[in-house]
Image (cartoon, helix red, strand yellow):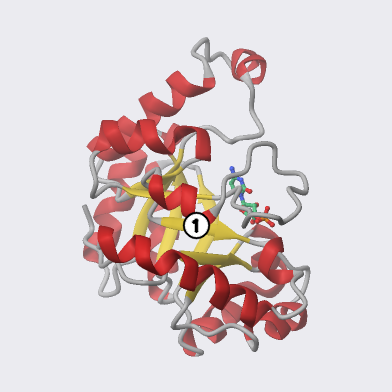
Amino acid sequence: MTGRTFDARRIVVALDFPDADSARVLLRQLDHSLCRVKIGKELFTRCGPAFVEEVVAQGFDVFLDLKYHDIPHTVSKAVAAAAELGVWMVNVHASGGREMMTAAVESVRASSHKPLLIAVTVLTSMAAQDLQEVGVDASPMEQVRRLATLAKHSGMDGVVCSAQETAMLRQLLGHEFVLVTPGIRPAGDAADDQKRIVTPEEAIAEGSHYLVIGRPIARAENPGRKLAEIASRLHGRFSDLC
Ligand code: C5P
């Protein structure tokens, strides 16, 4: 484990925008004492590390969601570069294997700034047949269980998981193992393209530490107020868990 602190900021707002200016408009409306933010492949590919540093300098904890998957040496160097940007969380694909994850863990341990290191198990876009086509005969749930266990044994801090998997992984891997859950919709919000949604309260109750929330906050009439509402509804729950 690379070490961590849990605090009130359980909400990770996804900055799913095509350009920095659109992301900046949302960032100006978010209180960084109530949330963290996620920068993924689209925004990073367009705006690069300078934008990540800009967001970090504003006081936001940044989850750099680039899902590294390569030979151990390359991943360890990429993780070290992410750590130098000052990000709070970074992720790799667990299917890169034990040696790749261990190299990433050692890289974080050697860095002065130590982001949380999270593994992606099975992409939620992949069903049993998709796994079979790439040579995996296990069901998605079995494969998630296998890769999450491998991630823990490799020293990773946690995994990204769907709402279907949270309770099983919490029971299997203990309270300290970080679970990051997307597919969150406050009661009454549209599901969009998410297939199985849970409310923020349900996700926390099932054992998720961090909730990735994009459109429900980004498209709200007042994103700052929407964030504050969700955070305040969660407050009673996470104070029991911290
Ligand atoms: O807008 P919404 O709340 O659906 O955004 C969810 C975020 O979480 C997006 O950035 C999406 O790419 C990400 N994500 C997901 N499902 C996964 C992994 C990541 O929705 N299994």
| Figure disc tally | 1
Q: Is residue 234 left or right of residue 101?
A: right
Residue at the (53%, 22%) spot, across then down: 140
Task: Measuring from the top left, give residue 188's x and y in whole percent.
Answer: 70, 55
Residue at the (23%, 40%) spot, across then down: 174
Residue at the (76%, 44%) spot, across then down: 193
Q: Residues within 10 Å of mark 1 (few under 14, many from 20)?
A: many
Residue 128 versus residue 165 in the image, above or below: above
Q: Is residue 25 left or right of residue 111?
A: right
Residue 129 is at least partly visible in this image? yes
**What residue is shown with label 1?**
211
User: For the residue marked with disc 1, what is the amino acid?
Assistant: Leu
- Camera-side residue of 32 and 137: 32
Quadrant where the C terminus sits is bottom left
Q: Is residue 127 left or right of residue 146?
A: right
Residue 202 versus residue 133 in the image, above or below: below
